[in-house]
Amino acid sequence: MSEKVTQRRAYQLKKFAPVYHDKYADDLIIFNSRKSFIEDFEIINRLINENKPVLVVIDNLRNALKNVNTNSATEMANFFSILNALKEIYQFSIIIVDHFKKHTNNLRSDSDLQSGSGVKTDLADSDIILRNSCQNKNWRILKRIKSRLIEESDSAKLIALNPQTLWFELVKEDVNEAEHIGLSEIQDKEELKDIACDMHEKGATLEEIARAIHKGKSTVHRYINEKNTQT
């Protein structure tokens, strides 16, 4: 994104922040480059040294590592060693944004979904997955795959993006991830009926169910009626 768009969104986040810190409220530095992180390392190091950030966000990893083989364990280990050295010297936190492999929409998050070498997960302090829910365009599944800092958990949280504030709000603490991913690939009619009825019993609307299983609302209504008739 451009600096202008990022600044505007940052202002919106600050405006509606649930916890406000004057000390860091207006300190946002954006560095865009057509070069790689390694090529621009001298500039990046100088900016960090001058501004003493509390958080550095690399968005995204693939663009930051142009001309680097992200499937190479050796090259990724070298890159992470640079990041860890910067973190230790300047005492800030780092968030690295990475993307899933292609054709993994229907795999659960405990699969190896991240693109490239698994060394990224091995060397990071925490590995957190954020993915879209097929039931609602503003819903996201949040799952912590690994953490060195706190107790690990296999549960997935359901959170909702508020388009007005750009903050997420907790919808449900623990959800069945399978209900929010990959339903479009299910072909068995009886299984689709079971999913539709289960979602309906939990309060989902016909529109939400139809979007989740990729069927029309009239089909969903028929599925539910047929199941109710059988019981």
Image (tube, rainbow, N blue to C red):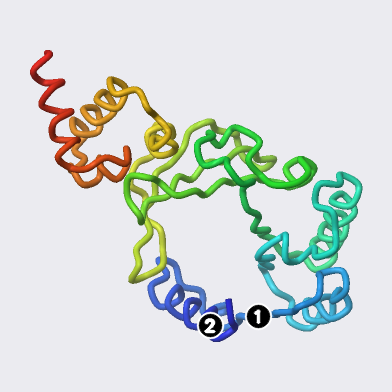
State yes or no: discs 2 and 1 in contact (Cβ < 8 Å): yes
The alpha-carbon separation of the residues under discs 2 and 1 comes to 8 Å
Q: Mark 2 falls on what kind of element? A: helix
Extreme residue in the bottom direction: 4
Q: Which residue is mark 1?
A: 30
Point out the image quarter for the C terminus.
top left
The residue shown at (45%, 73%) is 13
**Residue 98: x percent and y percent?**
65, 55
Q: Which residue is mark 2?
A: 7
The residue shown at (82%, 60%) is 83
Residue 78 vs residue 51, the one in the foreground: 78
**Marked residue nearer the N-terminal end (2 or 1):** 2
Q: Residues within 10 Å of mark 1 (few under 14, many from 20)?
A: few
Point out the image quarter for the N terminus.
bottom right
**Residue 23: x percent and y percent?**
57, 79
- Looking at the image, residue 97 sits to the left or right of residue 86; the answer is left
